[in-house]
Image (tube, grey):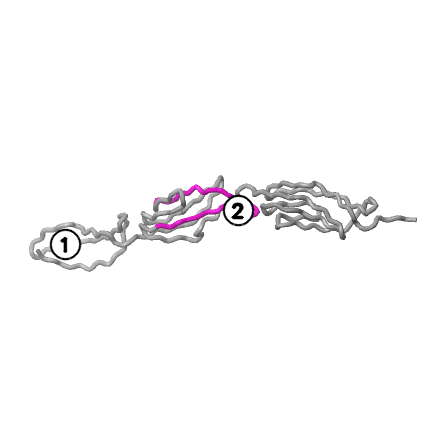
Amino acid sequence: VKVVPGKAAVIKLAPETIALTAGETQTLSFEVFDAYDNRIPSPDYRWEVEQNLGSVSGENVLRAEKAGEGFVHLLVGDASAQSAVKIVPGSIASVVVSPPAQVRLNTGQQQAFSAVGYDAQGNLLDLAPVWSIVGQIGAIDAGGTFKATTVGDGFVLARMDTVTGVTPITVEPGPIARVVIKPASADLRAGESIGFTATAYDAFDNVTPARFTWALESE
């Protein structure tokens, strides 16, 4: 008489609790027994992971992906077992600055920027950015608000730990605030001539493109 194990009734799954950082792995081990405590050597089984916390490979290795808490389930026929899983975010891998596309401003205008950091698995990190500007085009405060003052191209930088996010910014001249004529005065004799030049400036002393209409006014 040959006796074979019955249907799966009890599963011993280890470890019972798992704590990982996103990107880390944990090997899972298990044994399956029938109702009479006979070990089932090669059962058909499948894994289910709650909350998309991770995935289990064919070698029974759990890979942590999404930060959160839940359970990993092992199912063999009508029997099941579970291990509690807690995943925390990993180290920062990227910083995304918004707005992400190139920003164009006129001098005197302001733009609010925001930034978020993610680990390598795409989990959001609770980190505050440190703001700075590349290029002498304006100033940015601790809250991410940029004020344009000088015409040119530059970048807004948001640093979180060792990772920096970047977005390009272009500052263009603002409205004309004043016009400078050179020379400022001239004394001429009848028949003489002189050339004048005019330059327009915005409120921040940036040269502003302008078309001039010349007129002569007598005293």
Instruction: State the residue position of label 2.
Output: 124
Sequence-wise, which precedes: disc 1 or disc 2? 2
Q: Residue at x 66, y 45 (%)?
A: 62
Indicate yes or no whether the magenta region holds residue 112. Answer: yes
The foreground one among 31 and 193 is 31
Q: Residue 194 has which mark? A: 1
User: Label 1 to label 2, Cα distance in Å?
Assistant: 67 Å
Report x, y in % for residue 63: 64, 45
Q: Residue at x 71, y 48 (%)?
A: 74
Q: Residue at x 40, y 44 (%)?
A: 143
Q: Amino acid at mark 1?
A: Ile
Q: Which residues make up the magenta segment?
A: 110-136
Q: Residue 75 has which mark? A: none
Left or right position of 198 against 143 = left
Badge 1 element: loop
Report x, y in % for residue 157: 43, 45
The foreground one among 134 and 18 is 18
The foreground one among 12 and 153 is 12
* Front of the two marks 1 and 2: 2
